Amino acid sequence: MTQHLPAVVVLLTVLLQFGTLWAAGHARGKYGIKAPAITGHEGFERALRVQMNTLESTVMFLPALWLAVQYGFPLWGGVAGLVWVFGRVLYAVSYLQDAARRGPGFMVSMAGWAATVVLGVTGLVRALLAG
């Protein structure tokens, strides 16, 4: 199972991306925001920010996860990845309800991301020193 955990995390990340995409598209229809407009109703704007913020965070998260897994930490990288996914889901749900409540989810996801970075850097430095 350990070797498959990072793949499960990547799949969950893809599903998370789809979920935020769907939420933004649904909000666009619900509030009558015609493309290419990106403003017009607070509910739509929150959904769009959730989608964009999650996409931006994913761009930093996936390479960090890859480094952690590639350089010797598939289990702990996968666990940190699950923390990141959980944090991003909490972030998205909270932000969609009230933008002021997004902080805890953000902090949890950043803790997961930071853990993958630390693991990746540790593993890479160890590999470089080993020659």
Image: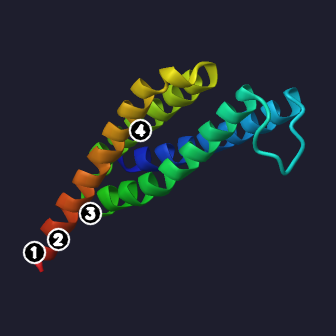
Q: Amino acid at mark 4?
A: Trp
**x, y percent for residue 129:** 9, 74
Q: Quadrant of residue 66?
A: bottom left
Q: Earlier in the sequence, mark 3 or mark 4?
A: 3
Secondary structure of residue under mark 2: helix
Task: Find disc 1 in the rendering and name its residue.
Answer: 130
Q: Residue at x 23, y 53 (%)?
A: 119
Question: Alpha-carbon distance for marks 4 and 2?
Answer: 25 Å
Task: Place residue 127 in its image quadrant.
Answer: bottom left
Of pointers 4 and 2, the one earlier in the residue sequence:
4
The residue under label 1 is which amino acid type? Ala
* Mark 2, residue position: 127
Question: Mark 3 or mark 1, which has the lower sequence index?
Answer: 3
Mark 2 vs 1: CB contact within 8 A:
yes
Decide: marks 3, 4 in contact (CB < 8 A)? no
| Mark 2 and mark 3: Cα distance apart in space | 7 Å
Front position among marks 3 and 4: 4
Q: Amino acid at mark 2?
A: Ala
